[in-house]
Each structure stands twice: as C-alpha cells, then as structure tokens.
Image (cartoon, rainbow, N blue to C red):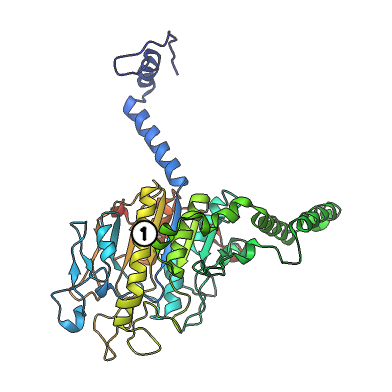
Amino acid sequence: MLSIEGRGHRMCDGLSRRRFIRIGALGLGGLTLADLLRAQEAGGEAARKSNRSVILIWQHGGPSQLDTFDMKPDAPVEIRGPFRPISTRSDAFQVSEILPRHAEIADKFSLVRSCHHTGAAVHDAGWQMMQTGRLFTGGINSPHAGAVVSYLRGRRTDLPPHVVLPERMGRGGGNLPNGQAGGFLGKAHDPFELAADPSQPDFKVPDLLPPPQIGAARIDRRRRMRDVVDGTIDRFEATENAALLDDNFQAAYRLITSTQARDAFDLNQESPETRERFGMNRFGQCCLLARRLIEAGVRFVTINTFLTVFDEITWDIHGSKPFTSIEGMKNIVAPMYDQAYAALIGDLFERGMLDRTLVCNFAEFGRTPRVNPAGGRDHWPQCYTSVFAGGGVQGGRVVGASDPIGAVPDDRPVEPADLVATIFHSMGFDLETRLPGPAGRPFGIVDPGHREIHELF
C-alpha cells in the first residue's frame, strides 16, 4: 500500500493526516474508504459472534402455545382456554396473564410462532429433533447443538464447553435417545452434568470433589506417577483410545483441581437477594447458575426445566393424573418459569452480557388446539412457539404466525433445523461446516436447505 510519512498532524475530526493519506491511497488499488469500513465492521461482528455463548432452556413436556405465547382470544372457549392475553412492552405481541413478568421484559425477547415438525407426537422424538436439528433415523444419533459447539470451539477455561443443568433428562415414551449427548461426535463431547439440585442448602457438585478418601495431594501424586508411566509406553500412547483416555483424564483433573471451576459453581457467592430474585427452586437456581457459568467462560449451558414427564408436574398438561392439569400449569409451573426467565434476562442485560449470550427457549412440541375431556391439552407437533433473546436477536418481534386456532403455521413455517441453524448463526459458524459422521460419512452442522431465522436479527 502507498504510504506517505508525515509528522502525525490531526485533521479537524481527529483523523491523523498520515492515516488520511493512507486511506486515500486505498482508492488507487480499487479499495474505497467505504470498503475498508465495511471490512472493519465485518471483522468486529465476526469477533463478537465467536465470543458468544448460549443458554438453551428446555421446556420439558411442551408448553401450550395457546395458553402462553400464541393466544387466540376470539376463538371458541374450547380452543382459547381459560386465560386472557395481556399487553406487554412490545407493540408486536401479547402474552398470557400467567406470564406477567414476561410481559415486563417483552422488548428483550422475540417469538417464533410457526414452529412445527413431522416427527412422531412423542416426547423423545421432539427432544431429539429440536436439540440436534435431525430426526433419529437409521441408528444415527446426532449430536446436541452444544456438542457441536464443543467440537468446533472447545473449552475456553478449566470449565467444560457444554454443561447440562441439573442433569440430562431420562427416556421418554418412545424409548429414543433424548438428544442431549455428543452423538456421533463421541462421548468426549457429552455435556458435563451437574447431578445435584442447586436449590438445596447442602448443594455441592459431586464431580468437583475428589473421593473422600483421596486428598488433593494424593491426586497430584497420582497424576505425576501416571505421567512417568505413560512416558514409557510409546506404542500404547499412539493409539486413538489412549489419546482419548488421556484427554478425558486431563479434563477431569483440571476440573477437580480448578479454583475457577469451584468458584463458578458456588452459588453462595451470590447475595441472598439475587438468589431470591431467581426463585429458590431447582429451575430458578439453575438459571442463576447458568449465568455464572457463562460469565466464567462456559460456551453452552442447557437447562432442563424438568427431568421426566412421568412423575413431576411439568408442561405436559394432559389434564388427568399422573399428568399436569391446566390449573397446575397456572399455579405451579408458570409462576416458577416466569420468575426465573425474567430474572435471567434482566440479570444478563444489567451486566452487559445479553448481546454476547443467546438465550433460547425450546420444547418438543405444542399442545392440541382443542381442550380435551379431562380439561387438558395433548401432544401437538404441528404448531408451537419458540423464544429467542440476546445473542444479536432483536427483541419485541414476532416471526411467523399460526392459523386462527393455533393448529398449523399460517405464515413462515419454521422447522427444528432452522432453529438450530439460528443458534449456530448467532455464534458465527459457517452453516456449510462439515462434521465427521459415522463410518466416515460427513454431516453438515445443519441439513442442506435450512438457514437461520434472519428476521430475528
């Protein structure tokens, strides 16, 4: 590039004369100032995206779109249900009266009301599709979106790249994989599981503690002895399995001995007022813990609102026991969820973390448009709503629409792979990236033809 040296005098707008002459010379090579500024902006945006993290809130059981985010107040009573819509801080949409705190922060999240999938109307089919972007077919277990992030980006700190709170959910009625594992990327990309309830007074993370009979000094001696032994077994060290074992050992050792990891999981470092703001229940404290983990460098946190649909009150509102009723949703599930979600979004915003943290609320399906004879709603993958906030998403928007009874998409249909692609887009991934699939077969991080939901950004 042509460069004319000078004494560094400043122009009236603060631009140095030397830089002004250098920029002017760009035009000689066909590159204009506008081109340069666009390139700088693109570089800055790429850096912002690559630094983002994700919190995926899994709405276990499948909330009713008609009773939460896609109400139909003009429909017959057996369609619209018992709740009324309320105004929000967004001019684009209303929400249900059972989510009053969502209404207060509606300018910070956006709704996708036209989600649907073609999988079976069983929980685990939807779990798999919505968290991996693919239906479980041919025995191929696709990786969770967080596992893909783990594979492509790796860890930033001593903490794992992907954490599930409080733990991975169990099997569903379809006896299919639940979509929360590393899949064909391997167990090395399975998430770290908390395996404890952070709302309990004696909360500790089991995997951050050495066995009681083994002190830290003994662990360190064992690590040094292992290093000596491993140095004498070159042929074994050359095998793929040995490398994997060593990687896993080192990761576990770093986690157990890391002060940073222990601090990130220590909710006692939060004030009682902050903990109460999120709600002193398992889901509320998991949301608070997710913020702490993202702040400490974890790339992807999945929060399961519930762990099973069989013996818990969940979003699975069939109406008759052992499942939840619409009243149970109103009095137990919705208040807990409303409080914790609003606290999480508010806390991220106040800390300046919302733009660099994408928060997604996904579920396996919606609920039937018509209330059933038991006073509940049944499984309905034909239409439901997903929620996005932060991570470059513009708040207060609605993408897509359902028909007058919330049964099928009426505008801008969205599939699970599009939702997963939106996560990857927010993080700056090239959606044409290939993954090493089973038997050497390459897989895209999303299936061909699926893109991010660009209207959100």
Image location of residue 85, percent across then percent down: 19, 69
Residue 98 found in image quarter: bottom left
The residue under the point 33% across, 66% down is 338
Image location of residue 42, percent across then percent down: 39, 38
Residue placed under numbered mark 1 in the picture = 343
The residue under the point 74% across, 57% down is 216
Does residue 50 appear in the picture of this structure? yes
* Quadrant (top left, top right, bottom left, bottom right) of the N terminus: top left
| Callout count | 1
Q: Nearer the viewer, residue 277 or 291?
A: 277
The residue under the point 38% across, 53% down is 347
Whether residue 371 sits left or right of residue 258 in the image: it is left
- Residue furthest to the front in view is 272
Mark 1 Cα within 10 Å, few/some/many (few <14, many 20+)?
Answer: many
The residue under the point 47% across, 79% down is 308
Q: Nearer the viewer, residue 346 or 308?
A: 346
